[in-house]
Image (tube, helix red, strand yellow):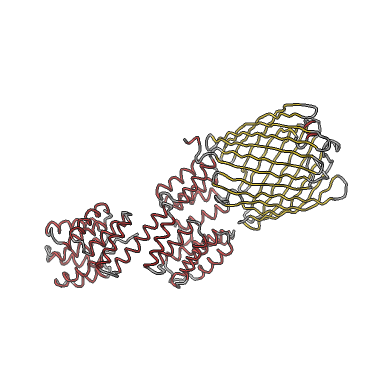
Amino acid sequence: MTTLKTLIKSLFFILALTCYGQNMQDGFTYLETGKYAKAETFFNTILKDYPNNKTARLCYGRAIGLNGKAEEAKILFSELLRDYPNDFEIKLNYGESLLWSNNFTQAEGYYKSLVTEAPNNFAALLGYANTLSNLKVYQDALIYVNKALEVLPGNANALTSKKYIYLGYAYQNQQAQNYDEAESLLIKNLGFFDDDKDTLLNLANLYIIWEKYDDAQETYKRLAEQPDYNTQALNGLALVAHLKGKENVALNLSSKAFAQLSNHTDSKVLQQTTERYVQALIWNKKYKQAENLIGNLMATQPNQNWVLALRATLNIYKSNFKQSLADYNQILVNDSTSFDGNLGKANALKALGRTDDALNSAKNTLKFYSNQKDAVNFINKINLNLSPSLESKASHTFDNGDNKAYALSANAIYPLSTKLRLLGTYNYRNTFNTITDNSATSHNVATGLTYELLPNLTAKGMVGLSTAQAETTDFTQLLTDLSLNIKIFKLQTLDIGYRRQVESFNADLLDRELVQNNYYANYNLSTNFNLGWYTQYIYTAQNDNNTRNLLFASLYYNLLAKPGLKVGFNYQYITFKDQVPTIYFSPEKFNAYEVFINLIKDEAIAKPKEWFYNVTTAFGYQYIEDDPKQTAYRLQGAFGYKFSERALLNLYGTHSNIASATAAGFTFTEVGIRLKWILTNKPIFKN
């Protein structure tokens, strides 16, 4: 954080007196103005004629040290110290050579002896402060930089060092997630250096990491008041808008910053602004524009890591994960320590289903960026997903056919590896009719596993028993659920399976011991332009020799991402081979059409101590046989709270008059409560 050259000017007034006396003012001017190569040549020439001239040797040592030859300078100053062991000026230069060569541990002991020898020497005090700063011993660094400022109040070099010591100290606390302390240090720094650009940028970044987006926004606005830094402020404001889910605002701000670029713009700001503009295009799904701009950058700056990272990000958003992975691998070829390369690769691998490799890449990120929050969160999320979990529900259902039911369920998942999971389920249902007094109780218990055969192919198998006690019969039936989940192409998934179940909608159906063998396929298609399609087909063969065909299709459009807002159209078709209307709803043909709107803040993206919700309303028409159409409506909702990353609770409910495979012509209501608990912080199998 602290530049190693802040001592230079503090020593120039000493050198000036010496050098001027030997008619070496030109050489000194080269040193003072940063023309170190010329200074090196100048003093080397002097030394050919005067090899023992102390001043020329000292100035030559400074020239080569500041020109990148730190070890040579260190040797030269060591020789000078042997010749002049009590010359404090030479001691100071030797100390500085230790800083040039990054020998901070050695420099600490050396400068400590210097400040003991000359406790009021400005150069020694400042050198010691800078040494401690580079060793990240910031509290002591502040003590000594303040002592230096007591010797020379208002010295520009000491003030610069003090600023960067505060910045380093704040960053150290930020990395340790001591956000309050980091904020306090940065605000103190602003008290010393009013509206300092670096401090404001660090403070805004702290607020972003702290997820205090409003404070970050205000800090960037404060920076924007300085015309020289308006572009950087707009870049920051665009990021904050994105983090707050305001993608259009982010693009508008980034477009404004991008329009300010010119041939005179600082190269670093030029890159940052271009990068943010491309990101904003991607956030707004303007993929073609982003692709064209990235193509232009590739043509002019081929193989540059920041451009490769933009292309990789674009491909992540477009679900081209293999192409994204290739770019991240190239970034790591260019620079194995790249943060974007290591963590970006982890995300791409996770999306490809390569969990073990993703974890390794994230851990590799932490080797270079200790305790980095994004990498730590990435690992924690995978660990939680691989930890044992339990989900339980309690519900009450009733309809206008006087059927009521109470149900309890529990589902447990116990991962044995990143690919293999044990499953267990239990369901209890008590149903009765208040008019007929018929009642029945069922218990379902099943166990099984899922196994990832390939990154895009997962198999599931469960087997269990259903036992029931009804009015006229008690029975036990076999339950099975076998399926394959296939990611067939980009943005497409297919589930195919077989499920054997007992119909338990009401007491009468349980009393008939109606067993259903369901053969099903679910297909889901997403797109990069917000349109989606889901369809389901189920063929059911029942033990009463009846069969059913059920087709459901949903076409929808995503209007908003945060919170999710979706509108769409649903169609359902049902047909039975045999019509037994006195026993259960079994039309020869049934058609239902509805439009729906869904508002959701998904529990998966909700942060701890946040609310989440999912609300759907639908309205349409249903056609039973050749009867006149009937209006159909459906209301569904869930509202919950996430206590931590490991625990959440929500209430849910459904109210509908849409006919199902078991009932028609009446309304149906269900209300319930659900608890989900991840039992451990880390996977058991890793312990």
The image quarter containing residue 266 is bottom left
Image position of 488 (left or right of 191): right
x then y, percent, for residue 129: 28, 59
x then y, percent, for residue 664: 82, 43
Image position of 115 (left or right of 641): left
x then y, percent, for residue 215: 50, 62
The image quarter containing residue 407 is top right
Image position of 645 (left or right of 651): left
The image quarter containing residue 73 is bottom left
Q: Is residue 291 something one can see in this rendering?
A: no
In the picture shown, does residue 316 fall above or below 9?
A: above
In the picture shown, does residue 651 fall above or below 308?
A: above
Residue at the right extreme, as displayed: 627
Q: Residue at x 46, y 45 (%)?
A: 361
The quadrant of the picture occupied by the N terminus is bottom left
Q: Residue at x 76, y 26 (%)?
A: 474
The residue closer to the viewer here, 562 or 148, is 148
x then y, percent, for residue 87: 14, 61
How many labels, in total? Answer: 0
The residue closer to the viewer here, 204 or 652, is 652
Q: Is residue 107 something one can see in this rendering?
A: yes
